[in-house]
Image (cartoon, coloured by chain):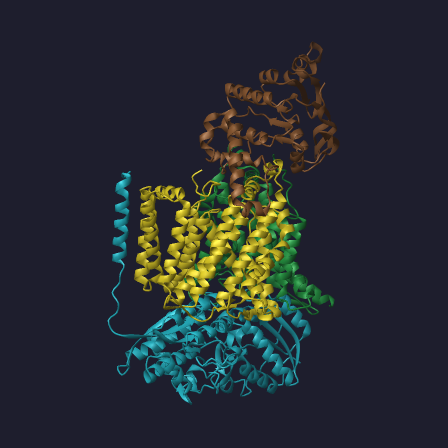
Chain colours: A green, B brown, C cyan, D yellow
Amino acid sequence: MDISLLLQFFINGCMLGMMYALVAVGFTLFFGVLDVIVFSHGDSVMVGAFAGLTFYLLGVYAVPGLPVWASAFFVFLAGMAFVAGAGMLISRFVIMPLRAAPALNTLLATMMLGTVMREAVRLFFPDGSNPKPFPRLLPDWSWKFGDVLLRFDNLALFVAGCLLIVGVAMLINHTRLGMAIRAVAQDAEAAQIMGVNFPLIVLATFAIGSAVAAFAGLMNGLYYNEINFNLGLLLGAIGFSSAVIGGLGNVYGAILGGFVFAFLQVVGTVAMPFSSAYKDVFAFGVVIVLMAIFPTGILSERQSQRV
Amino acid sequence: MNKVLFSCEGLTMKFGGLTALNRLDLGIDEGDILGLVGPNGSGKTTFFNVVTGIYRPTEGRVFFDGKDITGASSQTVFEAGIARTFQRSRLCLELSIFDNIMIGNFKRHDLGFVSNIFRRKTFQKTCEEEVEKAIELIRLLNPELVGSIHKPVADLSMIDRRRIEICRALIGKPKLLFLDEPSAGMTHDETNQLMDEILAMKSDERQLTIVLIEHEMGIIGKVTTRCAVLNFGEKLCDGTYQSIVENPLVQEAYLGREVTEDEV
Amino acid sequence: MMKKSVRWPVFGGAFCLALALSAVPVLAKDTVKVGYIGPLTGGNSAIGLGARNSADLAVRLQNADPKSKYQYELVALDDECKANIGVQVATKMAADAKILGAATHYCSAVALGTVDIYHRFKMPAIVWGAVEPKITYGNDYPEIFRTIGTQEYQNKVAAAFMRSQGYKKFAIIHDTTDYGKAHKEFFTQFITAGGAEVVGIFGVTAEQQDFTTELTKIKALNPEVLYFGGLTPLGVRIRSQMDKLGLKVQFEGTSGIKSDAYISGVGPALAEGTLSFLDGAPVEKLEGGKAFTQAYAQQGYAQPPEAMGIFAFASMKQIIDAIEKAGPSRKAIVKALQGLKEDDTLIGKVTYDKHGQNAIPLMTKYVVQDGKWTVWEDSEYASGKRSLIKVK
Amino acid sequence: MPNSRDFLRCSALAALLFTYIGFLLGAEEELSIAAYLLCGAGVVIALVLFDVFSAIERLVQANETFWQVLMLAGTLALIAVFHQDHYTLFLIGTIFIYSVAVLGINVQLGYAGVINFSGASFFGIGGYTAAVFLQNTSIPGSLTLPLGGLFAAVIGSLLLLPVLRTSGHYSALVTMAFALLMKVFLEVSEWLGGPQGLSLPPLEFMGINFAEDIVIMGKECSFYVKYDMVCLALLVLAFVFVRRVERSWMGLAMDAVRIDETAAACFGVNVTRWKITAFTMGNFVIGMAGALYAMMLSYINPSNFTFSDSLLFLSILLLGGIGSIWGVIAATAFMVVIPEKFQVVQEYRYLIYSAMVLAMILFRPSGLLPRKPRSYAMGGRS
């Protein structure tokens, strides 16, 4: 196992971890604000990828004079805006009406919503059931260090992902909107008394979480150059697991959880002697053990239970 | 002097930096009604929670009926004979009145698999007996409730819920009863009525000991045989109601001190 | 609201009226029903829908033919490529005595689960898409037939071909469905027999999205050929991620990726040079091929026939011909199908051995050239103008 | 026995209900199915509007035992009517078995509040146990039912430590991870038949081979009739067992644990013990149902027991009304028959089906027949 191979695994693991982290951030934001798990979030990732593809095919990006990769920015923007809008609609018509219902109702309702989104894309997107090629918007440069191949688009995506996560963390921790979100997360009633417009904050949180998910979807498309209507299902379960491992409600926890899960999978494939399909068995098995050791996630906020 | 039923020495409870209870020493005799008084946040409810095993005490020992129950689980504390009510009533609102009361009677129920599933006849019989017992207990507090014993608790008024909670605590024939602000959320005369009912129950069970957390001094004066005052987790003083009212430290804790000229 | 006593009659009356309304008149002419079962939802729905349309085409052409003795009606059911749903719909179809025969199943696990049911109800079933050998050879039920070849034969041809191209070191990726597993076993068996070496075998789940780790491990093993046993969705992901990781080796697939969706999924540039193997001959090479494609287009089906369309069409046509010849009884149809020798169908001559397996499967080698699956012999790769990827 | 007026009302109601179900099951053409569904929905809405529904509920509760006998008689009549129709009998059998499995989940979630997202995995464990035992040993088929339950309970106990230490969404994740893990494990392990799965010889029960058709009262019936009888027996057993658990001190202890763990502990309820009991008992019931399902299906493979199947079980429980036994049976019938009848719409099945469940959760969260406060006496008149 020479060093260049290890380096290549490390790069793959980072890219995977970034994608899982982006999805996990959405789960944590929604849980933070509304104590609710939105299981259609995985499918929002898929809708983001398909929205970006549609905007690309409609040529919305074709701003004359700009090189191709600069226009990629517009495809991302359009995709994220579309899914942010969808996220707000979901929160307004599915999540808010179920606020009084027990947590299981919301969890199941959002799972069914995810199925509706998947089937809708499969049926109504032209020839939706087959995998769709995703355009190579970023330039194709790559550097070779010995055997290790580092591609420009991977690096660009990773850096963009980091910037987005740092941006979200900054927004949550250092802006008035972020303070309002955290206030609502701690105690919705108290925040409302202090004049925080609760419905607006919920819409804003869903917009942010969904936009981040759309970014993950578009990143998935650019990284694998292929999207299919099914990618949201497993990504949703893994995103949820990452958010929970890291400790629900804690944005940094979600990021940590995402990378932990990614490296569990990479280790599962590399180190496991038997066929690599066991990597999911290994990864989810470790998740169960982690939950036994840290019942409320690794970086969980210590909430003492008022008796 | 009758036997010391309950005592704690140097009982301390720290939540991170906050010291909720600070080396509390308290003794309660059998048959006493002890009033636990003190401003908000003085550690009264924390004392209840530590004794009944919800929190593990940081330091100190707790003895009950001759046994050391320091840090015991809530379940063993209940089996030892201490029952309690909660400041914010924690009844099972979906379940019926009878169910809620029966929750307090688990010591006596046979939770075996066989008796619950196969020997239904005997189960029905014990069930009827329990219903009689529960009705008999409720009649003491509020006769109208007897009719709707199988109705869910959710439709009841605040005072009725408080009564059910007290029945739940008493059905298991505890030796020591912790009442946590029974007057919370009720009008003045409702509280008085409730206190008379509790006194009536106390009179026919000589050795029942009660610890009562209450803010209404009138009730404390009327009902309790002894009082203890807590402030910031420490015991200011201990004695009859009259003695604590005149105690300057207590007055200062409650009303604050006149500020002499030179201190301004 | 209404008085209590009035309420019951109103509620009862409304109910009976609704029941009467829904009794629907039955069709007058005597119809004969034939069945089709395939994956109409889920990952393989593209192949399933294409095959259903092709089977439906066979029925429509027969109904348009004035000489036809009966009016045919197609009953199409969805097995979702899941064994329990497959057993459910197979029972539904086989239990309906009016359905005389059916073209069934693309997913091998489902086909394996349902052969007993067709035998129990004595309904002739021609497997149009599932290539697992045990479906026909695993039992000696007279009712089970299969037009498409088996994975064993497909891999024997593939191994011989790859050896003739001089490849020695192979890496194998396969999905953990029975289809992928059988391909892996047969290809390993035949290729190692020919002296080549299998440097690594990797099983992946069908829903897996990321293969960078497996492909990096394969890159370290530096094989000459990457053999993929699995279907189009996975094939597209693996091929595009190979390119991202700079794994420049020859990509060899199976009948699972021989579809237009594969080429459009990875794009013509990446698909160039991909090998795959499929039973029968390509549509345009078949005598009836052009007529089939025209007729299919004429009907205006929403989905293309995909790789398995011709097999579903051929299977349905055989069942209809058997009914025309032997009459509408399941036993007679089974006997008629068993009697077929060198039967001329869309996919060439068909003869069934005693296990109901098409004894003379025709295996064709395909390579992607300029964005189209072309027969190896007609491609520029055979004539030497272009060459497959040869890693030194 | 109920008074004459109630007797008439109940029988009329049961008769109408079963004729409607009979027509719905028998319908084939799209038009008649749509008509039945519409008129069924219309009738239910009319009932609720004219508050006849609550009158019916009071009627049913008043003479509960008689109503149960009527239901049993109606089901047997249905089986008799469709004795020739293999497919409908297979559907009826599936309804029975799924009801038993969901009753198992009901004990876990409805009573003790332990969320179980891997219901289908334990269902599968039961099935695979039956398959392995039937193939390799010669023990009678009927014995594999309890064995299936036992294995499901034992393997379930592996999850106990994480499930007990976690609560709410965290314990949801633990069981979700187990469900995802179990499917891949079944697919990859060769000794369990890998992706092909395992086939099972037909059930031998007291000398009767369940694969041949039998003649009852002179009429030649489909072999599924025998399976339906065994499934009905298992359902009746599970019904009585779960009803008795609910109406006993065990049920009360579990409810106390579900509603408020801390308060329950303060009154001597051993929270851990009741969570373990509920989780293990539930898995045992689910495993038994899984074993019987595998025998009826005579062929199982990993794709039958996926995470989405666990979701189906939970949706059934939620739609029926968590904790309500009759609700579970009604919702199971709804969730097994409707997607089957939607076969006619084929590609759009999943879209319509999940949209309907979503609408149900949004507009009728308490479920079809929400759970009533428990009354210990059997007759319900206490």
Camera-side residue of A177 and B207: B207
Q: Residue furthest top?
A: B261
Instruction: Identify the residue at the far bottom of this view.
Output: C342
Name the residue: 56% across, 62% down: D143
Question: x, y percentage for residue B50?
Answer: 68, 32
Q: Image height check: is A55 above or below D263? A: below
- Tell me residue B263's x, y (percent): 71, 13
Q: Quadrant of residue B196?
A: top right
In percent of width and height, residue C27 lies at: 26, 69
Q: Quadrant of the C terminus of chain D?
A: top left
Q: Quadrant of residue B181?
A: top right
Q: Is residue B189 above or below residue C320?
A: above
Number of labels in the image equals 0
State the residue in front, B260 or B49: B49
Residue C28 % position (x, y): 24, 71
Q: Is residue C386 visible?
A: no
* In this picture, residue D108 sits left or right of residue A273: left
Q: Quadrant of the N terminus of chain D?
A: top left
- The answer to whether one can see residue C193 in this image is yes
Q: Is residue B128 left or right of residue D52?
A: right
Taking A22 as reference, is C85 above or below it?
Answer: below
- Depth check, front residue: C182 or A16: C182
Look at 66% across and 63% down and name the residue there. Answer: A268
